[in-house]
Amino acid sequence: MIPAFKSIRWRLQAWHGLLLLAVLAAFGSTAYYLALENRLRRVDQELQRRAAILLSRSLSAFAPGEKRGWHFRGEPPSGMEEGRKLSPKGGGRPEFPLDLGDGPGPDEEFRQPGEMRRPGGPRAQPLELRLSAEEQRLFEGGSPEGFYFKILTPDGNVSQQSTNAPAHVPFPLLPRSPSASLLRTRGELRELAQTMPRDLCLIVGRDVSSEHSETQRLAGWLGGAGAGVLLLGLAGGWWLTTRALRPIADISATAVKIAGGDLSQRIGAENAETELGQLAGVLDSTFDRLEAAFAQQVRFTSDAAHELRTPITVMLTQTQTALARERTPVEYRETLEACQRASVRMRKLIESLLELARLDAGQEPLPRAPFDLAQVAAECLENLRPMAADGRIELQADLAEAGCHGNPERIAQVITNLLANAIHYNRERGSVHLKTYVEQGGAVLTVADTGMGINPADLPHIFERFYRADKARSRAGGHAGLGLSISKAIVDAHGGTLSATSQPGEGTVFTMRLPAMAAAGKTAY
């Protein structure tokens, strides 16, 4: 059992869960603060509109000298940053619809209650604004969402207020400037403070608890929806990771069974188009080759033991017979000759096995050079003419120049073996046709006979070691069934191919293809 912190599934799930949680948290927080900001912005716009109305009404209550710089111009602006002191000369856009004229900049010190009287100016006097019925309705109503206003003197006393204004409104900290203005939040109250002539301060506010409540409800909905999406994402991620990693579990289970000795097991991935599906397909092919290799090894061991048992049995029988009683010199000689023949056969078999082992391991030295395949084939043909004459087999040749690159001695061994088989398995007074030519840049050699042919069921196995289509006759002739296996191993080591086609009763054609001389540079012949 793999620990959770080491499991790929749990790691993927944890990573996906954290990533999804971070995205949902960022989205929910952004949506919450944007919704709250939009609601407060609408409240701020209403506060500014009402403050502009009150300031415009207040101009008629002041002396002409006090009105300098307090001319109303235009509609209320669309918004104001909370807590920002505004001035037309302070480097920023004025948020209030008033032309405030010249005055101290925003860098002046903050004033406290009792410090608002400008040098040389009159003491602040109470102010009574005359509002129309429509304007009064802007500040009426007993609901918590109703707007209210207060006009405070520098001493903090109330000069005028609406009926729904809260009892205690602290004096705001404003710069010593007639253009000063700021927005502030006190608990559930949102207020706009603005300086007025005579060092008075106008405060327009509203209870924003309903906005906060709506935003809290929105936060609850966002939290619930986020939790649902998170659970759905985790469940979907678990399902996807389980489905995606299922081939890994299948691969592990199959590998365990194969390691236990059951080579017939296969993964059998359902979706071969995915990466793991393709890996499972490759492993299945590897397991197929592994099973075939083990089966071939078992068959090879059995056949090798069988082939070696025959000459050893002959030697033991002959020696036991000779030692059973006294023999004549002639009988001893016959025994020794039989043992010699068995030993020669066993030596040939062992040499063939060693040659195959070296070829399989790539340890067989194969010095290569350019040569003419037709010339090598002609020499092999001449060497086997006596054997063909004994069997009354006609040898025919059609040898065209075919340059290739390889080891001519090893290729001669292959050609000799193919010709010997064609002569040995041919019918009486048959023929063997040897041909060389160039095709698609490579050298090609064919050996065709008019013999008995090979059964279609045996044809795919003729290059296997110790395989004999006619087992009784092959063993009687002293053949172990390794000649074609060695020939194919030699041709494979040259990068070529060796194949066979046959029709029972008509003959067999062996075709050898070798790469051209381009591998080591072309040489003209």
Image: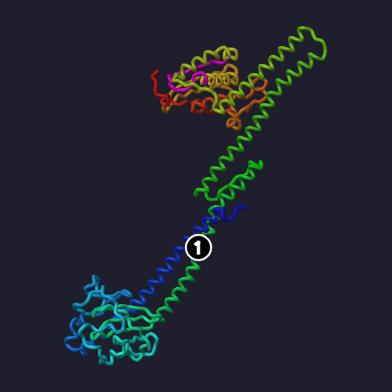
Point out the residue furthest to the left here: 64
Q: Answer above or below: position of 199 versus 465.
A: below
Relative to 445, 288 lies left or right: right
Whether residue 63 appears in magenta in the rendering, the answer is: no
Q: Return the residue at label 1.
A: 233
Of residue 332 and residue 41, the one placed in the foreground of this image is 41
Of residue 42 and residue 389, the one placed in the foreground of this image is 42
Q: How is the image coloured?
A: rainbow
Quarter of image, res 450: top right
The amino acid beneath tag 1 is: Gly
Q: Residue at x 74, y 11 (%)?
A: 334
Q: List x then y, in percent, for residue 445.
A: 48, 23
Quadrant of the drawing holding the C terminus: top left
How many numbered circles are shown?
Answer: 1
Q: Which residues are magenta?
A: 392-410
Circle 1 Cα neighbour tier, 10 Å, few/some/many (<14 / 14–19 / ≥20)? some
Q: List x then y, in percent, for residue 191.
A: 34, 81
